[in-house]
């Protein structure tokens, strides 16, 4: 496949999946999800394929996430597309996490939301000096999904909680520190990555692929999350958003003040639900359990006014001034959070 929103290419023993919506930062549509899924199934059974590489077209990003404008329109129309998108996207995340062959994700540039799901569940996660990674959902009245509630709680300390609640973007060193990536390789060497992988013999193992990637890697820089780990761990260890905000107010320094300022701009409902999902994810036994729980929350989002308001402010009117309802975390009742934790019907089929 050499055209369309996904380009499927074979180069030697490497199968390459290129996301091909560069003007939209390679944001995902349902046909893209289906095309990637179909390709992965085909490559899994192809003895000529030694590794699979996922990458984005253009120089700006790997994948900026799901096409939230399309999800917004589907939710407004009630046509079922949003539900189908989430169900099939989450199945794809699970396929990637359990993929039988070496799966290499090149997170060059913007990698957010659904892009993290396509990359960070993989076995070989590569970042570059241009990587900007985030789970920005609380800023659009949504919550971290695509298995993020499995990944983020397994970051060191409370780094994942910081990422999931603030939605702020991080660079290569922070992504590696948080366990969302493995190695940093210069963007100028990504072509060499593909060339070298394509020359591997059939039946090559993940160890063989890792040796290639290690040989092309470069030292990572300083991690801001690591530098501020003590503040993050003290402030984000609590069971409520109110306690986290109070703890940040009691911390000295610009990092805590900026973190608190950002949290106060996010959807209060999303903050509380995201924290509940992250804490539940920490207690969960599998990615599948987290994906199922996230799907239940996503389906309830179709009736959540903050979801529509957040997307309006971010991508439709672009005024960057969402009016959340309720407007404060103190006004979000526990029953409202519990409403979003209803199991999906029917359950997610993996």
Image (cartoon, helix red, strand yellow):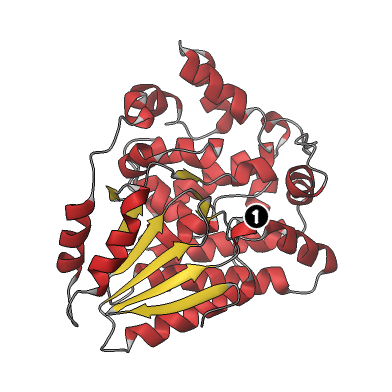
Q: Residue 52 versus residue 139: which sits nearer the camera?
A: 52
Q: Is residue 195 above or below residue 65?
A: below
Q: Residue furthest top?
A: 252
Taking 5 as reference, is 15 left or right? left
Name the quadrant containing residue 331. Answer: top right
Q: Residue 191 versus residue 270: which sits nearer the camera?
A: 191
Q: Residue at x 48, y 78 (%)?
A: 37
Res 147 seen here:
no
Q: Residue 49 versus residue 350: which sits nearer the camera?
A: 49
Taking 225 as reference, is 48 left or right? left
Are there few (<14), some (14-19), or many (20+) residues within 10 Å of tag 1?
A: many
Q: Secondary structure at mark 1?
A: helix
Q: Position of residue 342 (x, y in %)?
A: 62, 61
Q: Residue at x 67, y 70 (%)?
A: 83
Q: Residue at x 40, y 52 (%)?
A: 151
- Residue for badge 1: 340
Q: Is residue 98 above or below residue 257?
A: below
Q: Position of residue 10 (x, y in %)?
A: 37, 80
Q: Position of residue 118 (x, y in %)?
A: 45, 63
Q: Residue at x 46, y 45 (%)?
A: 279
Res 71 seen here:
yes
């Amino acid at each position: 496949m050499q055209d369309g929103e996904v380009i499927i290419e074979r180069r030697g023993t490497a199968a390459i999946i290129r996301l091909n919506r560069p003007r939209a930062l390679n944001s995902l549509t349902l046909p893209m999800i289906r095309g990637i899924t179909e390709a992965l199934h085909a490559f899994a059974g192809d003895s000529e394929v030694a590794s699979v590489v996922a990458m984005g077209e253009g120089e700006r990003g790997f994948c900026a996430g799901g096409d939230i404008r399309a999800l917004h329109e589907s939710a407004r129309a009630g046509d079922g597309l949003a539900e189908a998108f989430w169900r099939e996207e989450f199945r794809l995340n699970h396929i990637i996490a359990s993929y039988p062959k070496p799966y290499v994700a090149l997170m060059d540039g913007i990698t957010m939301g659904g892009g993290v799901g396509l990359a960070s569940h993989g076995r070989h996660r590569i970042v570059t000096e241009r990587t900007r990674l985030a789970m920005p959902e609380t800023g659009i009245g949504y919550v971290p999904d695509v298995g993020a509630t499995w990944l983020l709680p397994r970051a060191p300390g409370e780094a994942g909680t910081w990422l999931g609640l603030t939605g702020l973007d991080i660079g290569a060193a922070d992504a590696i520190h948080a366990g969302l990536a493995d190695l940093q390789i210069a963007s100028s060497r990504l072509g060499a990555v593909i060339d070298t992988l394509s020359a591997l013999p059939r039946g090559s193992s993940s160890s063989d692929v890792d040796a290639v990637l290690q040989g092309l890697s470069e030292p990572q820089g300083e991690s801001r999350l690591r530098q501020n780990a003590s503040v993050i761990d003290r402030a984000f260890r609590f069971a409520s958003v109110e306690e986290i905000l109070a703890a940040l107010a009691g911390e000295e320094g610009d990092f805590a003040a900026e973190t608190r300022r950002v949290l106060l701009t996010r959807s209060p409902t999303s903050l509380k639900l995201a924290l509940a999902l992250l804490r539940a994810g920490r207690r969960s036994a599998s990615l599948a359990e987290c994906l199922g729980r996230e799907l239940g929350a996503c389906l309830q989002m179709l009736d959540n006014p903050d979801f529509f308001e957040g997307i309006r402010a971010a991508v439709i009117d672009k005024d960057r001034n969402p009016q959340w309802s309720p407007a404060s975390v103190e006004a979000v009742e526990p029953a409202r959070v519990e409403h979003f934790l209803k199991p999906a019907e029917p359950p997610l089929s993996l």
